[in-house]
Image (tube, rainbow, N blue to C red):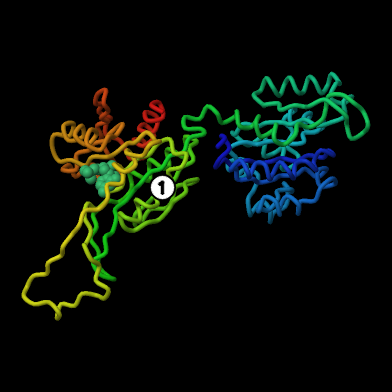
Amino acid sequence: MGFLANKRILLGVTGGIAAYKSADLVRRLQDAGAEVRVAMTPAAREFIAPLTFQALSGNPVHCDLLDPAAEAAMGHIELARWADAVIVAPATADFLAKLASGAADNLLLATCLATAAPIALAPAMNQGMWSKASTAANVELLRSRGFTLLGPDAGSQACGDIGPGRMLEPLAIIAGLDTLFSSDLLAGKKVVITAGPTREAIDPVRYISNHSSGKMGYALAAAAAAAGADTWLISGPTALATPERVKRIAVTSATEMLEATLSAMAGCHLFIGSAAVADYRPLSVAEHKIKKKDQSGTTLTLVLEKNPDIIATVAALPNRPLTVGFAAETCDLEVHARQKLDSKNLDAVIANDVSRTDIGFNSDDNQVLLVTAGGADWLPLMNKSKLAQELIARLAARL
Ligand code: C5P
């Protein structure tokens, strides 16, 4: 998988004949895993209809800066914030000139001016226009201000000339865009995280479970996705919203969690088992609700059997990912974490003290000890989302 997976790409289309290739570029961006929105200048609409891009991208096309209805739906500022990167393809000489001057008199220019995302430009124009000193000066200025120039190619042109000015082919544009994201900590990596509790059915209405909120696992998934990873969250029942860009697979029992985890393992680089998996499940699940009146005496005996150990199963896979577990302990944190590291054959264990009420299970904060074969490191008390970023940075360094 390249670095565009899960990325939000705004494709700007300006008024050049190469605009017909931009339709293919939408498809190629989607093939690379990106979500695509398209913004068109008025001149672009003379070459290709917005409907083409709407049908291909699955999103409304952004055309008008001054249309109240369009601005209310998703205005240029929102679009500028939405984008992880902007690619203008084709970028005409006129568009480059306006961009270099800071003009913002159409929606695409205004969005480019407003966004903090990186902007790549794929120029396309007649070779004479490309070779003019004014164009060269605009391009130089844009480069010096951090814009990424992709192309142009040289060769035969729509007007019959031969020379530099052809828009790069869509796949070459994709390769150029990829490099914009290649420095993300987890760019190109797949991360699978289990989170939350599991529920083990007793009968159709009752189950055995635990108090895990899933907050730590969800925070780790959000941090992994923000670091550029293709992130899968295998979650037991929780009340939490799926973090942005995370693929969540909802499961209920430990057996389902194991099954979902194993089927997500292909190409996985990092596995984090943060779920509070029930160690045991009822040996048999009653077909109908167990009735009090059918029981004799004052006790009810449930016979439990061991659940599979998900993380140990992952750690035993032939092509295992970096495998990281959690240890919820009430004393001797490092000793117990190290036992877990060895017995489950893990690469790291994140241990926390669940006897404290200010951290752990349902709390928004946590303080953990990161235990590896090489040592043990305390991370200070902080909120789970900050802690997740710190843990993801440390684990990314080990990949
Ligand atoms: O053995 P214990 O439950 O203390 O180990 C905790 C670690 O093992 C956690 O990372 C948890 O997600 C994982 N685990 C698992 N499958 C189980 C039990 C625990 O993946 N059945």
User: In front here: 320 or 1?
Assistant: 320
Q: Please give left or right for residue 75 compared with residue 370 in the image.
A: right
Q: In terms of image quadrants, where is residue 191?
A: top left
Report the quarter where the C terminus lies. top left
Q: Would the CB of label 1 be found within 8 Å of ligand 1? A: no
Task: Name the element at disc 1.
Answer: strand
When asked about the image quadrant of residue 141, the answer is top right
Q: Residue at x 33, y 40 (%)?
A: 384
Picture residue at 37% right of the left edge, 33% below the top: 322
x and y, in percent, of residue 395 in the image: 37, 30
Please name the amino acid that badge 1 sits on: Leu
Residue 363, visible in the rendered structure: no
Q: Quadrant of the N terminus?
A: top right
| Relative to 44, 142 lies left or right | left
Name of the residue lying farthest toward the left: 297
Q: Residues within 10 Å of mark 1 (few under 14, many from 20)?
A: many
Percent across and percent down for residue 259 are 37, 52
| Residue topped by disc 1 | 233
Quadrant containing ligand 1: top left
The answer to whether 235 appears left or right of 37 in the picture is left
Horizontal side of 225 relative to 281 (left or right) equals right
Instruction: Residue at 76%, 39% (x, y): give it.
Output: 105
Examine the rendered structure and indicate whether residue 104 appears above or below residue 55. Answer: above
Residue 170 seen in the figure = yes
x and y percent of residue 397 in the render? 40, 26
Compared with 200, 226 (above or below) is above
Measuring from the top left, give residue 248's x and y in whole percent: 44, 51
